[in-house]
Every structure is written in structure tokens, then in C-alpha cells.
């Protein structure tokens, strides 16, 4: 039996993780499950998997959670501190699947236990950067990349030494708007309708703006230290090749698979071994052709903004991420046009001097908070 905690258990990645556990239920002991406010979903999962503790981030939902778990013997807790305490319970693997910088505190709590963390929550690594990688080294923790591209790169890196890498290529589907001419009239429903992947709303909008690939560029820069100039992005609409590593001898290794997050999640859960997943094997003749395009940074400036933020380093990636989170929320709420998302992020990055490079978790959270205020002030001037 291996023990597991899932942070963000009610989301897309969380549910797909639980699906894999359900298929191998005799092999797993579930410790902590967490959610933002979906008490019904959280309590149902906690009961089904016999979790030790269920935590809802929204403190106002504690009584509801207690009621939903009554008679089960499962502990109920609420609030941000409780989230971090649950994340700090020792387990064999923690799946970090909260969306946004809200997941950073719990991820750091898991890292401080020196555990193995399957990291889907890219915003946490983008914001904390060196603060997180230093904590991983200091506490002897292991980060297993769950984001499909980074998981692909991680697998391709088993084929050689990182010092022999000539380049890393992140593939991007290009999102649902790749071929849409007029981006000004895009609705939230259009933006979240991803052609290949079924994901949460925030990452779906990020895929449409290409901020997802921008965040992934920064994520790759921290996970695979080959130098930013050796990390490239190529648009590959079929999402069959999940990313590639080119070595100095001219060999390029690629990882292929169905566009189903259960593949990279399974790769983390079973690492360094392998486990079964229920997907049909890749049918290459049915797919027929794979195509590749250079990204269009004039229409989709997000990858340029992310590369510039990564080059600037320090607080810039955390500011970019925070401004993007505010912009995506505003777009989903119908308050701003799609094309305004990147404009807002660029304005926040260019407004005044960037804060000093954060050195601790608290400093990262302060940079994040401050950038959210700045973005909100631009959106809703007093
Ligand atoms: P989602 O919106 O479906 O789920 C998010 C989860 O986080 C939910 O359980 C929710 O309750 C919880 N949550 C949200 N806000 C919270 C808060 N403030 N405090 C505590 N918990 C909170 O998101 P998702 O699509 O599963 O994505 C999760 C993470 O994984 C994101 O960082 C995303 O970029 C990354 N990711 C997702 C996919 C995918 O296919 N969905 C693929 C690669 C990477
Ligand atoms: Mg990805």
C-alpha cells in the first residue's frame, strides 16, 4: 500500500487522479483530500476513498463539510492553515492539483516534509521559482512534473544527460482560437472549448491566450536547467507529441500519447515504474498526419511576455502570473474582452518598478498579492 494526498481533489486533475486510484484501490491509502468550496464533491470523494482528512479552503463551509462527513469518522477542517497542515501530513506522494498561486502554500508544506510531489499546479512553481527549487533541494523532496509537456520532457531526459541537451521543445496545441481571425469578440464559452483536452476553466482560457505555454516555459526553465535560450515552443495542433528533447548528437527524443491527463498522472503515480491506464492505445494511422507551426506572437503575445518575465527573473514571473489570474477571472466574469487579458498583464509588468526578488514563501505571497491589487486597480480605477 502507498499513501497519497490530493490537493485540489475536486478539479479536473484531482478527479482524474482519483479515477486511477479507483481502478487500483487495493494499492492506495488516501490521507488528505482538499477542495476550494465544493463540499459535496469533496465529501463524496473522502467517503468513497476512506480519506483520513478532508479540507475545504473556504472557512465558511466548515459546518457543511462536517455535516456531509458525519458518522464517517473522517476529520473535517477548513481554511488556508488547515490546508497547509493537511498537506504536511507525511505521505508517499502528494498530487498538487490546486489551480493558481493559491496552491503555493500547501505545495511548500508538502515539500518541507521532504516528500514526493506530483506537480500539476504550475502557477505555484512559476510564482515561487527559485524559492521552491531551493526548498526542494534543502528538504530532499522530489518534484515529479505532471503537466503533460514537462512529464514528456522528464521521460525524454531518461535517455541522456542534461549536460548533453541541445534544446527542449515544448509542444502547444495552439488552443481553440488558433485559426479564429477576430479575437476581440471571443466569448468565455469559445475560449474554454479546447479541441484536445478536457480541463478546468482557468487553464482552458490560458490555452486559448497561450499564457498556458508561457507559464509552461517558465515552469520548464525551473525544472530543467538547460538555459532559457534552449527552450523552444512549437505549435502542434494534434497534441500527440507532448514535448521533445534534442541531444548534442542530433538525436531528438519525443514522448507521444493520447491527450488524456491520466497518462502523465499515471507516470508520476507509478514512477519509477509503470502502471496500466484505461485509454485506447495511440492509433497513428487513424491520426494520419502530425503538423507543426511556429507560434504567432503578434496575435498571441503571452509567450513573449512570459519569456521576457523569465529573462528578467526575480519577481517578474510572479507578477505575470498574478496579473494573468486576475485577468482570466475578469474575462470569465464577462468584465473584460479576451484580447484585454494580455494587455492587462503587460501593463502590470510595465507599471513602475518590479518588486525585489522574493527570497522566502512570504515574500513570494506578498509579490503575488501586490500584483493582484495593481491588476485590479487597472481594471477598476477608483
Ligand atoms: P480545476 O479548476 O478543475 O480544479 C482546481 C482544484 O483546485 C479544485 O479542486 C478546486 O476546488 C481547487 N481550488 C481552486 N481554487 C482554490 C483555492 N483558492 N484554494 C484551494 N483550493 C482551490 O483545475 P485543473 O484543470 O484540475 O488544474 C489544476 C492545476 O493543474 C492547474 O494549475 C493547471 O494549470 C494544472 N494542469 C491541469 C491540466 C488539466 O488537464 N486540467 C493539465 C496540466 C496542468
Ligand atoms: Mg501542459
Image: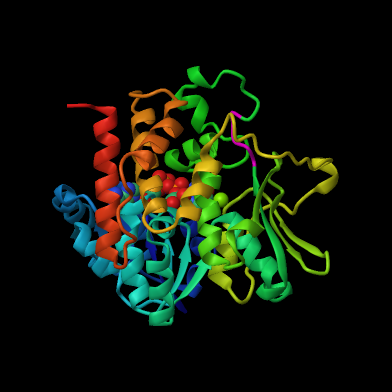
Residue 208's spot in the image, x, y percent? 54, 34
Is 173 rendered above or below residue 139? above
Is 179 rendered above or below residue 26? above
Residue 41 is at least partly visible in this image: no
Task: Point out the image quarter for the C terminus.
Answer: top left
Between residues 260 and 168, which one lies in front from this camera angle? 168
In percent of the image, x 71 and y 68: which residue is there? Answer: 165
Between residues 37 and 51, which one lies in front from this camera angle? 37
Magenta-colored span: 173-177
Residue 86's spot in the image, x, y percent? 27, 68
Q: Main secondary structure of the magenta part?
A: loop
Residue 43's spot in the image, x, y percent? 29, 54
Between residues 130 and 50, which one lies in front from this camera angle? 130
Determine which quarter of the picture holds residue 236: top right
In percent of the image, x 40 and y 46: which residue is there? Answer: 320
Residue 310 is at least partly visible in this image: yes
Residue 289's spot in the image, x, y percent? 83, 40
Between residues 25 and 187, which one lies in front from this camera angle? 187
In magenta segment, residue 175:
yes
Q: Residue furthest front?
A: 353
In percent of the image, x 72 and y 48: which residue is there? Answer: 240
Amino acid at each position: 500500500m502507498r499513501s497519497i494526498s490530493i490537493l485540489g481533489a475536486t478539479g479536473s486533475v484531482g478527479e482524474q487522479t482519483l479515477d486511477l486510484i479507483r481502478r487500483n484501490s487495493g494499492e492506495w491509502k488516501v490521507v488528505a483530500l482538499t477542495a476550494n468550496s465544493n463540499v459535496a464533491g469533496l465529501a463524496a470523494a473522502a467517503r468513497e476513498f476512506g480519506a483520513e482528512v478532508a479540507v475545504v479552503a473556504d472557512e465558511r463551509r466548515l459546518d457543511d463539510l462536517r455535516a456531509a462527513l458525519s458518522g464517517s469518522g473522517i476529520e473535517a477542517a477548513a481554511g488556508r492553515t488547515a490546508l497547509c497542515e493537511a498537506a504536511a501530513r507525511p505521505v508517499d506522494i502528494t498530487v498538487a492539483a490546486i489551480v493558481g498561486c493559491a496552491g503555493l502554500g500547501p505545495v511548500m508544506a508538502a515539500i518541507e516534509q521532504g516528500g514526493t510531489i506530483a506537480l500539476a499546479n504550475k502557477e505555484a512553481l512559476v510564482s515561487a521559482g527559485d524559492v521552491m527549487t531551493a526548498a526542494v533541494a534543502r528538504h530532499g523532496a522530489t518534484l515529479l512534473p505532471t503537466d503533460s509537456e514537462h512529464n514528456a520532457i522528464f521521460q525524454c531526459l531518461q535517455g541522456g544527460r542534461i549536460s548533453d541537451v541541445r534544446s527542449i521543445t515544448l509542444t502547444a496545441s495552439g488552443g481553440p482560437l488558433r485559426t479564429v481571425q477576430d479575437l476581440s469578440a471571443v466569448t468565455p464559452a469559445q475560449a474554454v472549448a479546447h479541441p484536445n483536452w478536457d480541463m478546468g476553466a482557468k487553464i482552458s482560457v490560458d490555452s486559448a491566450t497561450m499564457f498556458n505555454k508561457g507559464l509552461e516555459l517558465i515552469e520548464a526553465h525551473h525544472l530543467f536547467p538547460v538555459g532559457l535560450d534552449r527552450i523552444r515552443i512549437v505549435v502542434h495542433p494534434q497534441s500527440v507529441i507532448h514535448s521533445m528533447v534534442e541531444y548534442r548528437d542530433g538525436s531528438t527524443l519525443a514522448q507521444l500519447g493520447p491527450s488524456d491527463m491520466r497518462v502523465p498522472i499515471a507516470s508520476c503515480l507509478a514512477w519509477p515504474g509503470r502502471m496500466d491506464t484505461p485509454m485506447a492505445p495511440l492509433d497513428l494511422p487513424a491520426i494520419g498526419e502530425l503538423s507543426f507551426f511556429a507560434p504567432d506572437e503578434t496575435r498571441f503575445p503571452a509567450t513573449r511576455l512570459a519569456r521576457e518575465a523569465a529573462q528578467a527573473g526575480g519577481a517578474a514571473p510572479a507578477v505575470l502570473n498574478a496579473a494573468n489570474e486576475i485577468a482570466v477571472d475578469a474575462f470569465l466574469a464577462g468584465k473584460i474582452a479576451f484580447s484585454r487579458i494580455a494587455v492587462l498583464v503587460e501593463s502590470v509588468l510595465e507599471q513602475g518598478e518590479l518588486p525585489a526578488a522574493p527570497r522566502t514563501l512570504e515574500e513570494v505571497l506578498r509579490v503575488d498579492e501586490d500584483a493582484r491589487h495593481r491588476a485590479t486597480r487597472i481594471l477598476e480605477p477608483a
